Amino acid sequence: MLGPADILVGGVLPGAAALLLRQVLLRAGSSDRVAWPVAVGVAYIVGQAALTAPLGSGAAGWVAGLPPAFTKFFSPSEASQWLPAAVVVAAIVAMLASGGRTTRYVALTLGALLAIGLPLRMLWGSVYTLSQWSTGEAIAWIASLAVLLFATGWLLTRQMSDATPRVALLRDWLPGLVMVGVAIVLATSGSLSYARLAGAVAAALLGAALGGAGIQGERRLGFAAAGPLVTTLGGGMLLLGYFFAEVTTANALLLLAALAATGLPLPTLAANGWSNFALRGALCLVLTGAAAGSAGVAFSKAMAAQAADPYANWKSE
């Protein structure tokens, strides 16, 4: 079960960190090309470390557990511990992608390598690569996942100009809301630990979006400035859920489609962009709601079946 401590360290902490970082960087004169990826990346890494540290040993024990939690990121022993390193690479890709033509080519190359390396590294040494897949199947799986991640990253990195600054500010909330749906699906699909991490992603994205409040519209670039990070974190959570929990293929694809839809190019339906925002938002929420609803129904049926089983809670003597 999720308790107040989980919400505090996995939600409030990364959300507040992202909000403050983006606000401080923008007000200090930094470009949003730097502020967005730094705010999201740092906030998520802090959130994952905070959730990794022991929460049941009191505040002093939790603080003492933070340094070892950060140390684990330098010697990962399980799939989710590779995400902080991937976030650092994604932040570099994001900053290069918003630069000149030469840096964009470098970003494209690094982005392609990241799209291949993320699923490869997270699945390396798992039961899939060790025994379930042949070499050909492993190559096909990694290649397919890389194409999906790269295509999603390309959509989310596009700077969109179909809205006023006010509408763009609201649109920045969409990836965070999709990640809330990812957290719900993970929680009802057999992994509260991954759900907590997805909650930290959602908090970091929503906090960073809120961090643009009060900043002049021409200085805000929108979440596309952190597109590679959004893709890496969202895609990473879905990889964890699909391969290491019980997220179904349909729900994983629905959530990936919802994430991609936040950057989907649409025809300009109105001069102020409100129609585009409504259409894009409705599409994201419908896809996310469908996945969350499907996972919720399956979870309810499983709980009902367990309750009806007279031997489910049988205690052996």
Image (spheres, rainbow, N blue to C red):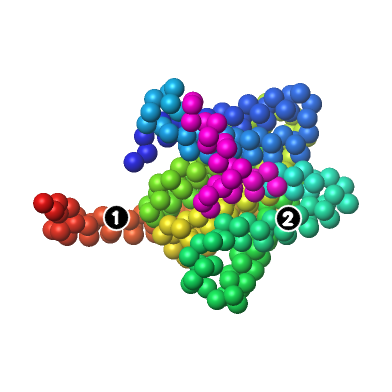
Kindly identify which numbered label has been placed on residue 300.
Answer: 1
* x then y, percent, for residue 206: 57, 37
Could you classify mark 2 by the number of other residues whose Cα lies within 10 Å: few (under 14), some (14-19), or many (20 or more)? many
Comparing 14 with 130, the one in front is 130
* x then y, percent, for residue 70: 57, 36
**Magenta stretch: includes residue 76:** yes
Report the amino acid beneath label 2.
Gly
Q: How far is the residue under mark 1 from the one under mark 2?
A: 39 Å
Report the amino acid beneath label 1.
Ser
Depth check, mark 1 against mark 2: the one in front is 2
Is residue 301 among what the camera can see?
yes
> Taking 241 as reference, is 148 left or right?
right
Q: Which residues are magenta?
A: 63-89
* x then y, percent, for residue 202: 53, 41
Is residue 213 among what the camera can see?
no
Comparing 164 with 16, the one in front is 16
Q: Which residue is mark 2?
A: 111
Q: Residue furthest left?
A: 317
Could you classify mark 1 by the number of other residues whose Cα lies within 10 Å: few (under 14), some (14-19), or many (20 or more)? few
Q: Main secondary structure of the magenta part?
A: helix
Residue ID at (51%, 51%): 78
